[in-house]
Amino acid sequence: MKHLLSMKDLDTDKIASLLEEAERISNGQVPELSEKFTAAYLFYEPSTRTKMSFEMAAHRLGVSLLNFVPEHSSTTKGESLYDTVKTLEAIGTDLVVIRHSEDQYYKDLTDRISIPLINAGDGKGEHPTQSLLDLLTIHQEFGKFNKLNIVICGDILHSRVARSNAYALSMLGANVYLSAPDIWQDQSLPYEYISMDEAVEISDVLMLLRVQHERHGSQMNWTIEEYHQLYGLTMEREQRMKHHSIVMHPAPVNRGVEIADELVECDRSRIFKQISNGVLMRMAILYRLLEKGAI
Ligand code: CP
């Protein structure tokens, strides 16, 4: 597989192999690239973690980066995404990472470009590199996925992280549940919805999602405090979690909305561990696609 677009591109063996590569990197075994590669990161939507950790990953592997800023590019003159990527390919770029607001923006590209493309988030579609770093975090904690109760909670309808993780974790044998207000449920997903009160009691991994105000186009039905009390991880709910359970969140976090401010860095929280793991996993992915030409 030349590109990484969706978790559906990966089987359990490929996921296991990427987790092992990331663990080796974590233990100081940074793989060496056999030649000098250049990558371009095209972020048409804002990002801190994904873009910066891809940059750190490239830096640690010795991959050169081209600086692409959509607002300063010929995108502003109407150039299509395809023509932009073809241009980067023509000047010698070896790999592109793209985040874009359109679901499956890559459909038009993949058969017509010869360099690898990594999807850093497509609209409400998928976020495969976030999912892989989340899998690394869960695997470090439990050493397995099979039979773990994983509840993904919050703004499911607008979440590409939820889609990638629910699919991948289910394929890996976890018991996946969703929890969301009625208006943010996605009934096309084949998973059971449970209440937040049930979620905190049964979960081994409570995966919270950001309320994606930028995708709603209208105001929330609740005040922040009402949402937090009804659907968030409150201080009181955290007390009811199992002793060994962990809290995850892809971040950025709306502190005091989907999670109490005090819990963002509590003992159960793996939120900043996820962010650190993002560098390891993105190093593993860049190495595989640049050096081996496939995951
Ligand atoms: N989790 C995530 O994708 O964060 P950014 O939007 O900051 O990249």
Image (tube, helix red, strand yellow):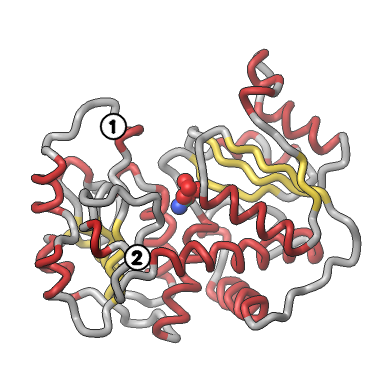
Please tell me which residue is depicted at 67% across the width and 60% down the height of the picture. Answer: 57
The numbered mark, 2 or 1, whose residue comes first in the sequence reads 1
Given the current orientation, which residue lies at the most extreme front position? 262
Q: From the top left corner, tell me how far across and down residue 233 is, in percent.
A: 19, 61
The answer as to whether callout 2 falls within 8 Å of ligand 1 is no
User: Looking at the picture, which amino acid does disc 1 mark?
Assistant: His
Q: From the top left corner, tell me how far across and down residue 113 is, in percent.
A: 76, 40
User: Looking at the picture, which amino acid does disc 2 mark?
Assistant: Met
**Which residue corresponds to mark 2?**
248
Would you say 64 lies left or right of 188 here?
Answer: right
**Which residue corresponds to mark 1?**
216
Decide: few, some or many residues near mark 1? Use Cα within 10 Å; few <14, some 14-19, many ≥20: few
The correct choice, above or below, for 51 with respect to 286 in the image is above
Q: From the top left corner, tell me how far across and down residue 284 is, in percent.
A: 67, 67
The answer as to whether callout 1 falls within 8 Å of ligand 1 is no
Please tell me which residue is depicted at 29% across the width and 48% down the height of the picture. Answer: 254
Q: From the top left corner, tell me how far across and down residue 91 is, in percent.
A: 87, 35
Secondary element at image label 1? helix
In this view, the residue in front, 261 or 148, is 261
Please tell me which residue is depicted at 46% across the width and 66% down the height of the picture. Answer: 274
